[in-house]
Amino acid sequence: MAPRNTSKSFLSLAASLTLLCIATSVSLATVAWINGLPTANLYSENLQVTNYRWGPNCAYIDVALYNNGTQTVLLRSVKVNSQPAAVVYIAGTCQIGRGELVVLRVSTASVQAVTYQIAFQTAKGNRFVYTAVAE
């Protein structure tokens, strides 16, 4: 016949193992939940036109472009009203660092008092569109 303390110790061991299993399950569920939460995109591209000025006879537009994203942006192309436009960098290059401002001259045959959409396409495929009225 087994002593009475043996059954008590077995129940204690079973309770401890059960609590350990529950704690492990809750921990794993918490980790899975945290990994599944939507997070802000920590690596984002964002270009913002801070200023623009039309040239004589609206032959070109000088655009000041600021990168307020979290990573360097490589500018691939510029389009005016969906048409490719020639670009000359007055200040900076096509690789725009985080917090950097570049000035580019976009060649376009524009008509005064007409609204134009200028689209900046990045190497990652992001497109930033700015609307300006020729002055």
Image (cartoon, rainbow, N blue to C red):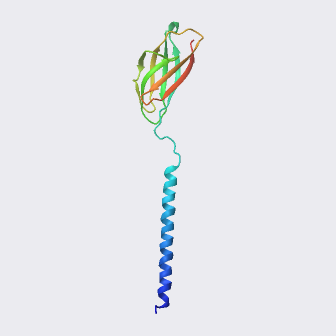
Q: How many marks?
A: 0
Question: Residue extending furthest front?
Answer: 1
The x, y position of residue 41, in whole percent, is 49, 40
Question: Residue extending furthest top?
Answer: 57
The x, y position of residue 113, in whole percent, is 60, 11
Question: Residue extending furthest right?
Answer: 113
Q: Looking at the image, is 90 positioned above or below residue 97?
A: above
State the residue in front, 74 or 8: 8
Residue at 47% from the left image edge and 33% from the top image edge: 45
Q: Looking at the image, is 12 positioned above or below residue 97?
A: below
Q: Is residue 121 left or right of residue 132?
A: left
Location of the C terminus (image quadrant): top right
The x, y position of residue 64, in whole percent, is 49, 22
Residue at 50% from the left image edge and 11% from the top image edge: 55
Residue at 52% from the left image edge and 6% from the top image edge: 57
State the residue in front, 85 or 70: 85
Residue at 53% from the left image edge and 49% from the top image edge: 37
State the residue in front, 57 or 131: 131
Question: Residue extending furthest bottom?
Answer: 1
The x, y position of residue 51, in whole percent, is 53, 21
